[in-house]
Image: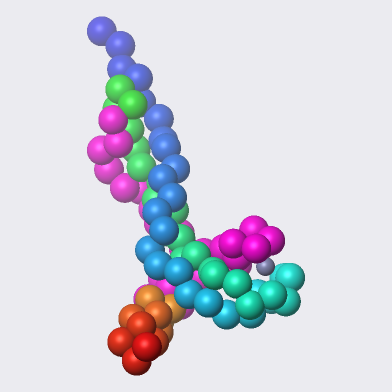
Amino acid sequence: MFLIFGTTLRDRVLDTVRFVCTYCGVAAQQRIIESATKLSLFFIPLVTLGRRHAVVCTNCGGATPLTKDQARHGLDWAARNREIG
Ligand SMILES: [Zn+2]
């Protein structure tokens, strides 16, 4: 009997916000991304080993790592601004 196991990295776009990018200086959509490292068995993801967050510019692709609190704050900010209009 043999086991095939490993880790996979899954990216998920949590939300998009619009502000001036610190890399390219363009006011563009910025994606708040959660990258989850998952332990997989026979290529089926089973357990999440860790999560990282980042904001990625859709114009230049520049990525800035975020802490979990910064990502949550960004999501709250996006939700608040969406309600206002
Ligand atoms: Zn940019």
Q: Quadrant of the C terminus?
A: bottom left
Can residue 69 be seen here? The reply is no
Q: Main secondary structure of the magenta part?
A: strand
| Quarter where residue 75 is shown | bottom left
Residue 78 location, x and y as percent? 40, 80
**Does residue 29 appear to the left or right of 50 in the view shown?**
right
Taking depth in this image into account, of 81 and 32 the one nearest to the observer is 81
Tell me: residue 79, above or below residue 7. below
Q: Which residues are magenta?
A: 44-72
Residue 17 location, x and y as percent? 48, 75
**Does residue 27 appear to the left or right of 68 in the view shown?**
right
Can residue 2 be seen here? The reply is yes
Residue at image location 40% in from the left, 54% down from the top? 12
Tell me: residue 33, above or below residue 75. above
Q: Quadrant of the N terminus?
A: top left
Q: Quadrant of ligand 1?
A: bottom right
